[in-house]
Image (tube, helix red, strand yellow):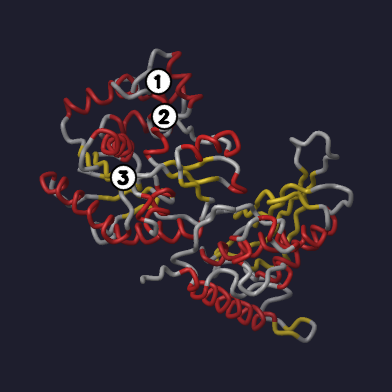
Amino acid sequence: MSCYALVDCNNFYASCERVFQPALTGRPVVVLSNNDGCIIARSDEAKALGIPMGAPLHEYAPLLKRQKVAVFSSNYALYGDISARVMDQLTFFTPDVEVYSIDEAFLGLDGFTPAMLPDHMRQLRRSIRQWTGIPVSVGVAPTKTLAKLANRIAKKYTSDGVYVMDDPELMTRILGDIEVEDIWGISKRWGARLRRMGIGTALQLRQASPRQIRQALSVVGERIVHELNGRSCLALEEIQPRKTIMSSRSFGTMISNRSDLEEAVASYTARAAEKLRRQRSRAGGIYVFIRTNRFRQQDPQYSNAAMVGMDEATSDTAKLIRAAMGALRHLWRAGYRYHKAGVMLTDLVDDHGDQASLFQTHLYTRGRDMAAERKTSDRRMAALDQINAAMGQGTLFHATEGLTPGGHHHREKRRHNLPKAERWRMRAQFKSPAYTTRWSDLVRVR
Protein backbone atom coordinates (compact mmCIF):
# COMPACT_ATOMS: atom_id res chain seq x y z
CA MET A 1 0.00 0.00 0.00
CA SER A 2 1.30 3.47 -0.89
CA CYS A 3 2.29 5.86 1.87
CA TYR A 4 3.42 9.47 1.62
CA ALA A 5 4.76 12.14 3.92
CA LEU A 6 4.62 15.89 3.40
CA VAL A 7 7.49 17.74 5.05
CA ASP A 8 6.77 21.45 5.43
CA CYS A 9 9.25 24.01 6.79
CA ASN A 10 7.55 26.09 9.48
CA ASN A 11 7.40 29.83 8.72
CA PHE A 12 10.27 29.21 6.35
CA TYR A 13 11.50 32.72 5.51
CA ALA A 14 11.34 33.82 9.14
CA SER A 15 13.04 30.59 10.24
CA CYS A 16 15.89 31.20 7.78
CA GLU A 17 16.54 34.59 9.34
CA ARG A 18 16.57 33.05 12.81
CA VAL A 19 19.18 30.44 11.87
CA PHE A 20 21.91 33.08 11.87
CA GLN A 21 20.36 35.34 14.49
CA PRO A 22 19.31 33.05 17.37
CA ALA A 23 18.39 36.10 19.47
CA LEU A 24 15.28 36.37 17.29
CA THR A 25 13.88 33.16 18.79
CA GLY A 26 10.62 34.03 20.54
CA ARG A 27 10.55 37.50 18.98
CA PRO A 28 8.04 38.36 16.22
CA VAL A 29 9.61 38.36 12.76
CA VAL A 30 8.20 39.46 9.39
CA VAL A 31 9.67 39.30 5.88
CA LEU A 32 8.76 41.78 3.16
CA SER A 33 8.00 41.37 -0.52
CA ASN A 34 10.01 42.83 -3.40
CA ASN A 35 10.76 46.52 -2.91
CA ASP A 36 9.81 46.20 0.77
CA GLY A 37 6.14 46.62 -0.11
CA CYS A 38 4.05 44.05 1.77
CA ILE A 39 4.49 41.43 4.48
CA ILE A 40 4.78 37.98 2.86
CA ALA A 41 6.02 35.86 5.78
CA ARG A 42 5.33 35.96 9.52
CA SER A 43 6.57 34.05 12.52
CA ASP A 44 3.96 32.61 14.89
CA GLU A 45 4.60 35.52 17.26
CA ALA A 46 3.88 38.03 14.46
CA LYS A 47 0.68 36.18 13.56
CA ALA A 48 -0.41 36.40 17.20
CA LEU A 49 -0.14 40.20 16.96
CA GLY A 50 -2.83 40.15 14.26
CA ILE A 51 -0.52 41.06 11.39
CA PRO A 52 -2.21 39.70 8.24
CA MET A 53 -0.50 38.18 5.23
CA GLY A 54 0.00 40.77 2.50
CA ALA A 55 -0.25 43.70 4.91
CA PRO A 56 1.30 46.88 3.44
CA LEU A 57 4.43 47.85 5.35
CA HIS A 58 3.55 51.55 5.57
CA GLU A 59 0.21 50.79 7.23
CA TYR A 60 1.67 48.48 9.88
CA ALA A 61 4.98 50.27 10.50
CA PRO A 62 3.76 51.86 13.80
CA LEU A 63 2.60 48.47 15.13
CA LEU A 64 5.85 46.79 14.07
CA LYS A 65 7.89 49.45 15.84
CA ARG A 66 5.73 49.41 18.95
CA GLN A 67 5.87 45.62 19.27
CA LYS A 68 9.60 45.47 18.44
CA VAL A 69 8.99 43.23 15.43
CA ALA A 70 12.14 42.24 13.52
CA VAL A 71 11.65 43.28 9.89
CA PHE A 72 13.62 41.80 6.97
CA SER A 73 13.68 42.39 3.24
CA SER A 74 13.39 39.21 1.15
CA ASN A 75 16.74 37.43 0.84
CA TYR A 76 15.92 34.86 -1.84
CA ALA A 77 19.52 33.73 -2.33
CA LEU A 78 19.70 32.77 1.35
CA TYR A 79 16.27 31.13 1.37
CA GLY A 80 17.00 29.16 -1.80
CA ASP A 81 20.31 27.88 -0.48
CA ILE A 82 18.86 26.78 2.85
CA SER A 83 15.94 25.14 1.02
CA ALA A 84 18.38 23.15 -1.10
CA ARG A 85 20.13 21.98 2.07
CA VAL A 86 16.88 20.86 3.68
CA MET A 87 15.77 18.97 0.56
CA ASP A 88 19.17 17.31 0.25
CA GLN A 89 19.04 16.10 3.85
CA LEU A 90 15.65 14.47 3.28
CA THR A 91 17.31 11.89 1.03
CA PHE A 92 19.01 10.44 4.13
CA PHE A 93 15.60 9.17 5.22
CA THR A 94 14.14 7.98 1.90
CA PRO A 95 15.41 8.04 -1.69
CA ASP A 96 11.96 9.03 -2.98
CA VAL A 97 11.73 12.82 -2.64
CA GLU A 98 9.59 15.20 -4.70
CA VAL A 99 10.45 18.85 -4.08
CA TYR A 100 7.05 20.53 -4.28
CA SER A 101 8.01 24.11 -3.40
CA ILE A 102 10.80 26.06 -1.72
CA ASP A 103 9.58 24.88 1.69
CA GLU A 104 7.67 21.65 0.99
CA ALA A 105 8.55 18.16 -0.19
CA PHE A 106 6.63 14.91 -0.59
CA LEU A 107 8.36 11.70 0.49
CA GLY A 108 7.56 8.23 -0.76
CA LEU A 109 7.51 5.83 2.20
CA ASP A 110 6.82 2.51 0.50
CA GLY A 111 8.69 -0.25 2.28
CA PHE A 112 8.37 1.27 5.75
CA THR A 113 6.21 -0.67 8.19
CA PRO A 114 3.38 1.38 9.76
CA ALA A 115 4.72 0.76 13.25
CA MET A 116 8.08 2.36 12.51
CA LEU A 117 6.75 5.48 10.73
CA PRO A 118 6.06 7.75 13.76
CA ASP A 119 9.54 7.30 15.26
CA HIS A 120 11.20 7.54 11.86
CA MET A 121 9.46 10.84 11.09
CA ARG A 122 10.29 12.24 14.54
CA GLN A 123 13.92 11.38 13.93
CA LEU A 124 13.70 13.10 10.55
CA ARG A 125 12.29 16.22 12.19
CA ARG A 126 15.00 16.30 14.88
CA SER A 127 17.77 15.73 12.36
CA ILE A 128 16.63 18.45 9.94
CA ARG A 129 16.49 20.90 12.84
CA GLN A 130 19.96 19.89 14.01
CA TRP A 131 21.58 19.88 10.55
CA THR A 132 19.98 23.02 9.07
CA GLY A 133 18.38 24.92 11.95
CA ILE A 134 14.96 24.81 10.23
CA PRO A 135 11.91 23.46 12.12
CA VAL A 136 9.62 21.26 10.04
CA SER A 137 6.25 19.56 10.41
CA VAL A 138 5.53 16.11 8.98
CA GLY A 139 2.19 14.65 7.93
CA VAL A 140 1.93 11.01 6.86
CA ALA A 141 -1.04 9.42 5.04
CA PRO A 142 -1.92 6.90 2.30
CA THR A 143 -2.21 9.63 -0.39
CA LYS A 144 -0.59 12.99 -1.13
CA THR A 145 -3.88 14.85 -0.62
CA LEU A 146 -4.37 13.28 2.81
CA ALA A 147 -0.69 13.89 3.63
CA LYS A 148 -1.31 17.60 3.05
CA LEU A 149 -4.16 17.52 5.55
CA ALA A 150 -2.10 15.43 7.99
CA ASN A 151 0.67 18.02 7.84
CA ARG A 152 -1.80 20.74 8.73
CA ILE A 153 -2.84 18.76 11.79
CA ALA A 154 0.80 18.12 12.72
CA LYS A 155 1.59 21.81 12.54
CA LYS A 156 -1.42 23.08 14.50
CA TYR A 157 -2.48 20.36 16.90
CA THR A 158 0.47 18.14 17.87
CA SER A 159 3.27 18.74 20.34
CA ASP A 160 5.97 16.92 18.37
CA GLY A 161 5.17 18.24 14.86
CA VAL A 162 4.39 14.77 13.44
CA TYR A 163 1.02 13.26 12.62
CA VAL A 164 0.42 9.86 11.03
CA MET A 165 -3.10 9.49 9.62
CA ASP A 166 -3.60 5.76 10.21
CA ASP A 167 -6.83 5.56 12.24
CA PRO A 168 -9.88 5.32 9.90
CA GLU A 169 -12.37 6.48 12.54
CA LEU A 170 -10.23 9.43 13.58
CA MET A 171 -9.63 10.27 9.92
CA THR A 172 -13.40 10.45 9.36
CA ARG A 173 -13.85 12.87 12.26
CA ILE A 174 -10.97 15.03 11.04
CA LEU A 175 -12.32 15.24 7.50
CA GLY A 176 -15.67 16.31 8.88
CA ASP A 177 -14.03 19.37 10.46
CA ILE A 178 -12.09 20.50 7.38
CA GLU A 179 -13.65 23.04 5.03
CA VAL A 180 -13.71 22.01 1.40
CA GLU A 181 -11.67 25.07 0.38
CA ASP A 182 -8.84 23.89 2.63
CA ILE A 183 -8.27 20.76 0.56
CA TRP A 184 -5.17 20.75 -1.62
CA GLY A 185 -6.25 21.42 -5.20
CA ILE A 186 -9.64 22.99 -4.39
CA SER A 187 -9.77 26.68 -5.31
CA LYS A 188 -12.26 29.19 -3.94
CA ARG A 189 -14.16 29.02 -7.21
CA TRP A 190 -14.36 25.24 -7.05
CA GLY A 191 -15.27 25.46 -3.36
CA ALA A 192 -18.21 27.75 -4.17
CA ARG A 193 -19.36 25.33 -6.86
CA LEU A 194 -19.17 22.38 -4.44
CA ARG A 195 -21.10 24.29 -1.78
CA ARG A 196 -23.90 24.90 -4.26
CA MET A 197 -24.01 21.10 -4.56
CA GLY A 198 -24.32 20.76 -0.78
CA ILE A 199 -20.68 19.76 -0.27
CA GLY A 200 -18.97 21.91 2.35
CA THR A 201 -16.46 19.62 4.11
CA ALA A 202 -13.73 17.21 3.14
CA LEU A 203 -15.85 14.33 4.49
CA GLN A 204 -18.80 15.26 2.28
CA LEU A 205 -16.50 15.45 -0.72
CA ARG A 206 -15.05 12.03 0.12
CA GLN A 207 -18.58 10.60 0.20
CA ALA A 208 -19.59 12.21 -3.10
CA SER A 209 -19.86 10.37 -6.41
CA PRO A 210 -16.50 10.59 -8.28
CA ARG A 211 -18.36 10.74 -11.60
CA GLN A 212 -20.57 13.61 -10.39
CA ILE A 213 -17.52 15.54 -9.18
CA ARG A 214 -15.78 14.96 -12.48
CA GLN A 215 -18.75 16.46 -14.32
CA ALA A 216 -18.91 19.43 -11.94
CA LEU A 217 -15.18 20.14 -11.75
CA SER A 218 -12.86 18.04 -13.89
CA VAL A 219 -10.83 14.85 -13.79
CA VAL A 220 -8.72 16.61 -11.16
CA GLY A 221 -11.75 16.82 -8.88
CA GLU A 222 -12.45 13.13 -9.40
CA ARG A 223 -8.87 12.31 -8.41
CA ILE A 224 -9.24 14.35 -5.22
CA VAL A 225 -12.30 12.27 -4.25
CA HIS A 226 -10.33 9.05 -4.75
CA GLU A 227 -7.37 10.48 -2.80
CA LEU A 228 -9.64 11.41 0.12
CA ASN A 229 -10.81 7.80 0.14
CA GLY A 230 -7.23 6.60 0.49
CA ARG A 231 -6.70 5.54 -3.13
CA SER A 232 -3.52 7.11 -4.43
CA CYS A 233 -3.92 8.83 -7.81
CA LEU A 234 -0.96 11.23 -7.60
CA ALA A 235 2.41 9.50 -7.65
CA LEU A 236 5.69 11.22 -6.85
CA GLU A 237 6.77 13.23 -9.85
CA GLU A 238 10.17 13.87 -11.26
CA ILE A 239 11.02 17.55 -11.59
CA GLN A 240 10.27 18.56 -15.17
CA PRO A 241 12.14 21.38 -16.91
CA ARG A 242 10.09 24.54 -17.18
CA LYS A 243 8.77 25.42 -20.62
CA THR A 244 9.41 29.14 -20.13
CA ILE A 245 11.63 31.10 -17.77
CA MET A 246 10.62 34.55 -16.53
CA SER A 247 12.70 37.21 -14.80
CA SER A 248 11.07 40.54 -13.96
CA ARG A 249 10.97 43.10 -11.18
CA SER A 250 9.41 46.40 -10.27
CA PHE A 251 12.12 49.03 -9.95
CA GLY A 252 13.20 50.44 -6.60
CA THR A 253 12.58 53.91 -8.05
CA MET A 254 10.91 54.72 -11.34
CA ILE A 255 13.42 55.40 -14.11
CA SER A 256 13.20 57.62 -17.15
CA ASN A 257 16.51 57.22 -18.94
CA ARG A 258 17.35 54.54 -21.45
CA SER A 259 20.70 53.46 -19.99
CA ASP A 260 19.10 52.48 -16.66
CA LEU A 261 16.41 50.52 -18.47
CA GLU A 262 19.03 48.72 -20.55
CA GLU A 263 20.93 47.75 -17.40
CA ALA A 264 17.77 46.42 -15.79
CA VAL A 265 16.78 44.32 -18.81
CA ALA A 266 20.35 43.03 -19.22
CA SER A 267 20.47 42.03 -15.55
CA TYR A 268 17.14 40.22 -15.75
CA THR A 269 18.27 38.44 -18.90
CA ALA A 270 21.45 37.27 -17.17
CA ARG A 271 19.44 35.86 -14.24
CA ALA A 272 17.07 34.06 -16.61
CA ALA A 273 20.04 32.63 -18.55
CA GLU A 274 21.48 31.22 -15.32
CA LYS A 275 18.20 29.42 -14.62
CA LEU A 276 18.14 28.20 -18.21
CA ARG A 277 21.57 26.59 -17.93
CA ARG A 278 20.73 25.17 -14.51
CA GLN A 279 17.96 23.06 -16.04
CA ARG A 280 20.19 22.21 -19.03
CA SER A 281 18.06 23.92 -21.64
CA ARG A 282 18.49 26.40 -24.48
CA ALA A 283 16.11 29.16 -25.55
CA GLY A 284 14.82 29.69 -29.06
CA GLY A 285 13.33 33.11 -28.32
CA ILE A 286 13.22 35.96 -25.84
CA TYR A 287 10.23 38.13 -24.94
CA VAL A 288 10.91 41.60 -23.48
CA PHE A 289 8.36 43.95 -21.90
CA ILE A 290 8.44 47.38 -20.26
CA ARG A 291 5.68 49.34 -18.56
CA THR A 292 4.92 52.42 -16.52
CA ASN A 293 3.00 52.41 -13.23
CA ARG A 294 -0.68 52.15 -14.16
CA PHE A 295 -1.67 53.13 -10.61
CA ARG A 296 -0.14 56.59 -11.04
CA GLN A 297 -2.87 58.09 -13.18
CA GLN A 298 -1.22 61.49 -13.07
CA ASP A 299 1.70 60.12 -15.12
CA PRO A 300 1.54 59.41 -18.88
CA GLN A 301 1.08 55.69 -19.41
CA TYR A 302 2.91 53.38 -21.80
CA SER A 303 3.51 49.64 -22.04
CA ASN A 304 4.83 47.50 -24.83
CA ALA A 305 6.51 44.18 -25.54
CA ALA A 306 8.50 42.52 -28.28
CA MET A 307 9.50 38.97 -29.17
CA VAL A 308 12.85 38.07 -30.74
CA GLY A 309 13.53 34.66 -32.25
CA MET A 310 17.03 33.21 -32.16
CA ASP A 311 18.59 31.73 -35.30
CA GLU A 312 19.78 28.87 -33.12
CA ALA A 313 18.63 27.96 -29.62
CA THR A 314 21.20 29.18 -27.10
CA SER A 315 22.00 29.47 -23.41
CA ASP A 316 24.76 32.04 -23.94
CA THR A 317 24.08 35.09 -21.77
CA ALA A 318 25.82 37.46 -24.18
CA LYS A 319 23.70 36.34 -27.13
CA LEU A 320 20.50 36.58 -25.13
CA ILE A 321 21.39 40.05 -23.84
CA ARG A 322 22.18 41.17 -27.39
CA ALA A 323 18.75 39.98 -28.55
CA ALA A 324 17.06 41.67 -25.57
CA MET A 325 18.83 44.96 -26.30
CA GLY A 326 17.63 44.76 -29.91
CA ALA A 327 14.05 44.37 -28.70
CA LEU A 328 14.43 47.21 -26.21
CA ARG A 329 15.58 49.62 -28.92
CA HIS A 330 12.21 49.16 -30.61
CA LEU A 331 10.27 49.42 -27.33
CA TRP A 332 11.94 52.48 -25.82
CA ARG A 333 9.98 55.72 -25.76
CA ALA A 334 11.34 58.88 -24.12
CA GLY A 335 9.23 60.98 -21.77
CA TYR A 336 7.89 58.16 -19.57
CA ARG A 337 8.73 57.02 -16.04
CA TYR A 338 9.13 53.26 -16.19
CA HIS A 339 8.06 51.14 -13.25
CA LYS A 340 8.72 47.56 -14.36
CA ALA A 341 10.51 45.51 -17.00
CA GLY A 342 11.09 41.85 -17.59
CA VAL A 343 12.17 39.11 -19.93
CA MET A 344 10.83 35.65 -20.66
CA LEU A 345 12.86 32.94 -22.38
CA THR A 346 10.65 30.85 -24.66
CA ASP A 347 10.80 27.86 -27.02
CA LEU A 348 13.01 25.97 -24.58
CA VAL A 349 14.68 22.80 -25.77
CA ASP A 350 16.89 20.21 -24.13
CA ASP A 351 20.56 21.06 -24.01
CA HIS A 352 21.50 18.07 -26.15
CA GLY A 353 18.25 17.47 -27.99
CA ASP A 354 17.71 20.73 -29.86
CA GLN A 355 17.62 20.85 -33.62
CA ALA A 356 20.65 22.59 -35.08
CA SER A 357 20.45 25.22 -37.77
CA LEU A 358 21.08 23.84 -41.25
CA PHE A 359 23.37 26.72 -42.07
CA GLN A 360 25.14 27.31 -38.77
CA THR A 361 26.08 23.98 -37.27
CA HIS A 362 28.77 21.61 -38.52
CA LEU A 363 29.36 24.01 -41.43
CA TYR A 364 31.77 26.84 -41.94
CA THR A 365 29.76 30.06 -42.16
CA ARG A 366 31.57 33.24 -43.10
CA GLY A 367 34.84 31.56 -42.25
CA ARG A 368 33.69 30.41 -38.79
CA ASP A 369 33.16 26.91 -37.47
CA MET A 370 29.79 27.39 -35.73
CA ALA A 371 29.90 24.02 -33.99
CA ALA A 372 33.24 24.92 -32.44
CA GLU A 373 31.91 28.34 -31.42
CA ARG A 374 29.01 26.69 -29.68
CA LYS A 375 31.33 24.45 -27.68
CA THR A 376 33.44 27.45 -26.75
CA SER A 377 30.33 29.32 -25.66
CA ASP A 378 29.23 26.39 -23.50
CA ARG A 379 32.64 26.23 -21.81
CA ARG A 380 32.62 29.99 -21.22
CA MET A 381 29.15 29.88 -19.63
CA ALA A 382 30.14 26.88 -17.49
CA ALA A 383 33.16 28.79 -16.19
CA LEU A 384 30.99 31.86 -15.51
CA ASP A 385 28.47 29.81 -13.51
CA GLN A 386 31.16 27.94 -11.56
CA ILE A 387 32.93 31.13 -10.50
CA ASN A 388 29.69 32.85 -9.48
CA ALA A 389 28.56 29.76 -7.59
CA ALA A 390 31.86 29.61 -5.69
CA MET A 391 32.47 33.32 -5.13
CA GLY A 392 28.95 34.75 -5.07
CA GLN A 393 26.50 35.92 -7.72
CA GLY A 394 27.76 38.99 -9.53
CA THR A 395 31.47 38.17 -9.15
CA LEU A 396 31.60 37.89 -12.94
CA PHE A 397 29.02 39.71 -15.03
CA HIS A 398 28.41 41.29 -18.43
CA ALA A 399 29.23 44.98 -18.61
CA THR A 400 25.76 45.75 -19.98
CA GLU A 401 24.32 44.87 -16.58
CA GLY A 402 25.87 48.05 -15.16
CA LEU A 403 27.22 46.39 -12.01
CA THR A 404 30.54 47.13 -10.38
CA PRO A 405 32.84 44.34 -9.18
CA GLY A 406 31.24 43.06 -6.02
CA GLY A 407 28.25 45.19 -7.03
CA HIS A 408 25.93 43.05 -4.92
CA HIS A 409 27.01 45.01 -1.91
CA HIS A 410 25.29 48.09 -3.30
CA ARG A 411 21.96 46.34 -2.87
CA GLU A 412 22.35 46.18 0.87
CA LYS A 413 22.97 49.95 1.14
CA ARG A 414 20.11 52.28 1.83
CA ARG A 415 18.27 53.43 -1.23
CA HIS A 416 19.53 57.04 -1.12
CA ASN A 417 23.16 55.81 -0.94
CA LEU A 418 22.95 53.74 -4.10
CA PRO A 419 25.03 54.86 -7.07
CA LYS A 420 22.92 56.29 -9.86
CA ALA A 421 23.42 53.16 -11.97
CA GLU A 422 22.00 51.02 -9.17
CA ARG A 423 18.82 52.97 -8.39
CA TRP A 424 16.63 50.82 -10.61
CA ARG A 425 17.28 47.82 -8.39
CA MET A 426 14.74 46.67 -5.83
CA ARG A 427 14.53 48.36 -2.48
CA ALA A 428 15.89 46.07 0.22
CA GLN A 429 16.53 48.33 3.18
CA PHE A 430 16.25 45.52 5.75
CA LYS A 431 18.05 42.73 3.89
CA SER A 432 20.18 40.35 5.92
CA PRO A 433 23.66 39.27 4.75
CA ALA A 434 24.13 36.42 2.27
CA TYR A 435 25.43 34.16 5.03
CA THR A 436 25.82 31.02 2.91
CA THR A 437 26.48 32.32 -0.62
CA ARG A 438 29.11 35.06 -0.24
CA TRP A 439 32.52 34.72 1.40
CA SER A 440 32.48 38.26 2.82
CA ASP A 441 29.19 37.55 4.63
CA LEU A 442 30.26 34.38 6.44
CA VAL A 443 29.38 34.48 10.12
CA ARG A 444 32.37 35.38 12.30
CA VAL A 445 32.68 33.57 15.63
CA ARG A 446 34.46 35.63 18.27
Q: Quadrant of residue 79?
A: bottom left
Is residue 441 shown above or below 43?
below
Task: Specify the farthest residue to the left.
Answer: 115
Task: Specify the farthest residue to the bottom.
Answer: 367
Q: Earlier in the sequence, mark 1 or mark 2?
A: 1
Q: Which residue is painted at 29% across and 60% down in the image?
A: 91
| In the displayed structure image, the side of residue 87 where residue 76 appears, left or right | right
Image coordinates for residue 1, horizontal then vertical, percent? 20, 43
Badge 3: residue crowd in 10 Å (few <14, some 14–19, many ≥20): many
Image coordinates for residue 194, horizontal then vertical, percent? 43, 19
Badge 1: residue crowd in 10 Å (few <14, some 14–19, many ≥20): few
Residue position for label 3: 6
Badge 2: residue crowd in 10 Å (few <14, some 14–19, many ≥20): many
Q: Which residue is painted at 48% across and 37% down in the image?
A: 66
Residue position for label 1: 212
Tag 1, which secondary structure?
helix
Q: Amino acid at mark 2?
A: Gly
Q: Which mark is residue 37?
A: none
Image coordinates for residue 219, horizontal then vertical, percent? 43, 32
Tag 3, which secondary structure?
strand
Q: Which residue is painted at 31% across and 45% down in the image?
A: 6
Q: Amino acid at mark 1?
A: Gln
Q: Quadrant of residue 320?
A: bottom right
Image coordinates for residue 295, horizontal then vertical, percent? 74, 35
Tag 2, which secondary structure?
helix
Residue position for label 2: 221
